[in-house]
Amino acid sequence: MIEKDFEKLLDVGIALSSVRDLDELLDLILSEAQRLTNADSGSVYLVEGDKLIFKVSRSNTYFAKWGEAKTRQIFKSYEMPITKGSIAGYVALTSSPLNIPDVTNLPKGTEYSYNPAFDKKYSYKTVSMLVVPMMNNAGKIIGVLQLINSIENGNTVPFTPNHQKITMSLSSQAAVAIQNAKLNADLKNAYLDTIFRLSSAAEYKDKETSNHIKRVSYYSRLIAEKMGLPREECELIFWASPMHDIGKLGIPDSILQKPGILTDTERKSMQYHTLIGALILKSSKAEVLEHSKIIALTHHEKFDGSGYPQGLKGSGIPLEGRIVALADVYDALSSKRCYKDPFPEEKITAILKESTGKHFDPEILEVFFKNADSVNKIKDNYQDTVKDLENVINFENIRIADLLE
Amino acid sequence: MIEKDFEKLLDVGIALSSVRDLDELLDLILSEAQRLTNADSGSVYLVEGDKLIFKVSRSNTYFAKWGEAKTRQIFKSYEMPITKGSIAGYVALTSSPLNIPDVTNLPKGTEYSYNPAFDKKYSYKTVSMLVVPMMNNAGKIIGVLQLINSIENGNTVPFTPNHQKITMSLSSQAAVAIQNAKLNADLKNAYLDTIFRLSSAAEYKDKETSNHIKRVSYYSRLIAEKMGLPREECELIFWASPMHDIGKLGIPDSILQKPGILTDTERKSMQYHTLIGALILKSSKAEVLEHSKIIALTHHEKFDGSGYPQGLKGSGIPLEGRIVALADVYDALSSKRCYKDPFPEEKITAILKESTGKHFDPEILEVFFKNADSVNKIKDNYQDTVKDLENVINFENIRIADLLE
């Protein structure tokens, strides 16, 4: 390699380390590999169990022909077993690179073979291939980087030994970055799972299922996104909103579970759940908790100032509080509770419309109505099952065997 | 730079990306920088607010003279303002490297000066210095890497321009790795904070303060560590144990808060908190939650088989359940509750000794007694304040102004 190649690789290493989102990272790895080798096309596969999962592909030819979006749609995720029969499988199994000048003309006795199905289907002509293993520090294979058709002066040529060297070096950097992105994703998933579980536990006595919390969270993020908030803020609202009712933990059963209408004193006590929630969540260094404190404190404020605990009005109510207020009420109206069936959609719409500018922010409500399809998709994805409802209602249904699964 | 330098740098980049613990990472950055430049000594400073915080230092001379531990003790964390007066401050402010052949002979009119205090105190002779800024992708300075006395054939010589080039390249890689380690630490801290808060919220009605949960968590990790469990398992127990009583959320107030002795039926209902907890936590992909499920389910089992819910016996009880059982009971005995003062240490010891092999695992108890000093340190660090206790006991004490801080 020449000095310029090394410098490029060092820069690429830094760029890869800076990306924490896995999909974005895989795309960057591939585009850098293409750039360093003049490859027309390429794909990244990741090892998951005993399979290779096709994760991302790029192709200058297809991008020019169909655009990026359509190309990505065509080359959707698929998986294949790790066997010596396929080129990517062979590389994954042997942990050695393959630099193939012409896949249509493989030497006799070659263990792997080229599958021309995609080429035929989409009239592409794969000739040269450079396929390298991506191995982490411990020498474990975590994926395969596959490059197709190196282009020189408009012609397809074989990949050079220098291309191979550069790509091998890149793939080592890529492997560590992928591993980090995965660890980061695992940690975030565990964190979110914990928030969902502990937050819904707090609504156990309210006979709310864990899906209630999830739906409110998804509705809130949807509203935030459709209002055009920055991605990071939408995520913060998504993570923070499940904790909105955590303060109910402090409310006596006699009030929380009272069947009829609350007395004035009881209602006042009940309203303390906003303050207790904020007390539990306050003064954290964590941004998520700071947001969840604000939501816990303000999700019962009303747009016209008639809410609690502070009687804030209009834009004086923090935006995340206004958003979760709607998401929470909508979910109460639209889902089955032990004392009621879901309201019909028209009735809900009527109730919400009636509340415009009184309970709810008109702008938020408008965004919500405009995106009814997405709202319904969330509702369908996180439906309560009969078992969820039963377990919540009567804990004597719990069987130890189920817990040990 | 020559090819070998580049290859080294690429390897170092991968090594740095693989380390996720900040302290370990800073030490690795420094030792690699020393190796690449033959520097006898060096330090890493990180920018925090408007200060430079001295984080880690290494010195072949001191390590040989005193050993690593003593050296690290002497060069403990200290901070300095970012001003042009100091060498590291100058580099942080100007974002440019300084390659100084002889710090004792700086040209007239130099804005920064060398502080010989450490040299005098520890009879070291600093001559050449190479000090480079560590900047992230966005060009923001996040720290300073300072190298002292390049050695050639046993003599101190100035750092070469090639050393400077290599160190600059290393420092770019280092900056991204540091930033990632910090983001990772922030995420983990937020996650742990959330676990502590939501878990202690679940004990709100039990009049437990949030410090109860923390103490149990720290005691449990201490026991795990002193039993010689692998570091990762100790951490899992630390993270998982706060959720041990989450199932209490499902227990009616009439039982949970009953002043006198429970009837048999009530006691049986109360015992369901182990099952409810496991139900809330089960079937997660997250390792922490899987452990917390086991702890929730088994922390009331007793060594002689007389516990609940399964009546498991001896080593049939998962180790983490046995550990948390002791930590939880010890904390109940040793801390103030609204109905009792802390028991005197002798009384606690007597109670626990009496329970050896009955309630508690004798081996765990032995480890616990052996480490009484560390136990007491945890108790002191996470003492309940009067305000904690008051807020837990009566939520009408909560003031909105306090929540908005």
Image (tube, coloured by chain):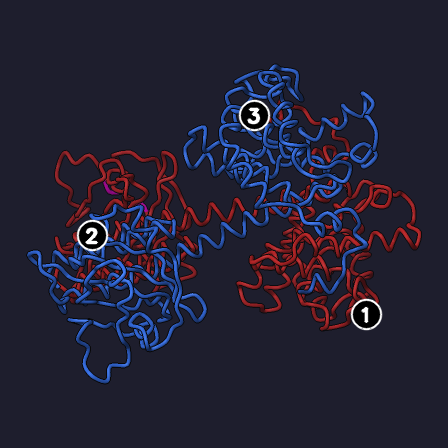
Chain colours: A red, B blue
Q: Amino acid at mark 3?
A: Arg
Q: Is residue B230 visible?
A: yes
Q: Chain of mark 2?
A: B
- Comparing A109 with A20, the one in front is A20
3 vs 2, front mark = 2
Q: Quadrant of the C terminus of chain A?
A: top right
Considering the whole magenta stretch, tell me its main secondary structure. Answer: loop
Distance between the alpha carbons at the discs numbered 2 and 1: 68 Å
Q: Determine which quarter of the picture holds residue B328.
A: top right
- Comparing B169 with B338, the one in front is B338
Choose the circle earlier in sequence order: 3 or 2.
2
Q: Is residue A125 visible?
A: no
**Residue B31, image x, y percentages:** 24, 53
Tell me which residue sits at (12%, 53%) in the image.
Answer: A161
3 vs 1, front mark = 3
Q: List the residue tagged with mark 3.
A: B322
- Comparing B151 with B144, the one in front is B151
**A370 lies above or below B343:** below
**B188 lies above or below B333:** below
**Residue B27, image x, y percentages:** 30, 52
Element at badge 3? helix
Within 10 Å of disc 3 (Cα), the crowding (few <14, some 14-19, many 20+) is many
Most extreme residue toward the left, as rendered? B153
Q: Is residue A116 magenta?
A: yes
- Left or right: A270 with respect to B305? right
Q: List the residue tagged with mark 2.
A: B60
**Residue B371, image x, y percentages:** 49, 32
Element at badge 1? loop
Magenta residues (range):
A113-117
- Left or right: A159 with respect to B303? left
